[in-house]
Amino acid sequence: MEWTVQELAERADISGRTLRHYHQIGLLEPDRIGSNGYRYYGADAVSRLQRILLLRDTGMPLANIAAVLNAPRTPEVEIEALAGHLESLAQERESLDRRIRAVEHTLSMRRQGREPRMEVMLEGFNDRYEEEVVERWGREAFDASNQWWHGKSIQQQKQWKARADALLDQWREIQEDGHEPDSAVAQEHASVHLEWFKEIPGTPTHAGDTAKSIDMVRGLADQYESNPDFHVAFGTPEAARFASNALRLRVRKLEPSSRDDFRG
């Protein structure tokens, strides 16, 4: 049995234009073209169309679908293509989640009559906190961290930002999984967070100043809990509060007997 474009389109619930486009790009060839110019599709073409539509429903680009269908028909080929497409979709979802958080943050700030925070790579590492950093730790501390940041390439800044986002996202995941701030997993991540502070020149942890390090972490924990900007960064106010409590517990354990942990 053969079907015309219109007949096959109706049965497949797609448009005739779609079938003609698939023909034009070489994705789906008709079995034959009649003397009247009509395209006719047989059983093999229908079977191929079914696979096209199944893969298209996953959001896979047509070029990738063509590569799958034109490769030797083995389960491994399709599995590899779908796995790659799944990874791509996950990345798109992360990008969309970041955009949603940015819009939510901007909307929240506008409703409060406040200015939204700029992207850190555009405004500098700690520009927004210059007055506070200088007041608490001195001009040298501010300049050291700012010079460290601007000494990075754009790619290095993006990589650092991705690590920072992952660090905060992990706090939200731990909190949403039902752990307590004093649990082993939370305290382990608190240690990771402290190690992250060590990487930043100008911070007391980088300098190995134990007393000031503990003071800094407690001050930041208070900021995480009370500042709406950090609520956005952590994903939720609950995650920010959870991280604050876990970090307070961690530095409490470090005082006084385990202070050397800061020096590493």
Image (cartoon, grey):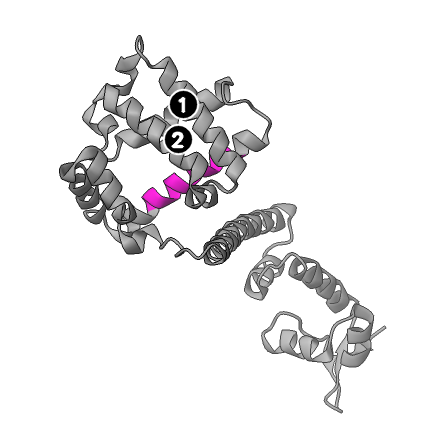
Is residue 243 found left or right of 150 in the rendered image?
right
* Crowd band around label 1 with a 10 angstrom C-alpha radius: few (<14), some (14–19), many (20+): many
Pointer 2 residue: 221
Is residue 209 found left or right of 14 in the rendered image?
left
**Depth order, front residue of 249/201:** 249
Q: Position of residue 50 (x, y in %)?
A: 74, 62
Q: Position of residue 227 (x, y in %)?
A: 42, 41
**Furthest residue in direction front, as rendered:** 113
Amino acid found under the numbered disc labelled 2: Ala
Q: Secondary structure at mark 2?
A: helix
Amino acid found under the numbered disc labelled 1: Arg
The correct choice, above or below, for 209 with respect to 256 in the image is below
Query: CA–CA distance between discs 2 and 1?
Result: 7 Å
Confirm whether residue 167 shows in the render: no
The correct choice, above or below, for 149 with respect to 214 in the image is below
What residue do we see at 21% from left, 38% from top? 135
Image quadrant in which the C terminus is located:
top left
Image quadrant in which the N terminus is located:
bottom right
Q: Which residues are magenta?
A: 159-172
What residue do we see at 26% from left, 14% from top? 260
SS majority, magenta = helix
Q: Secondary structure at mark 1?
A: helix
Q: Are marks 2 and 1 in contact (CB under 8 Å)?
A: yes
Q: Which mark is residue 248?
A: 1
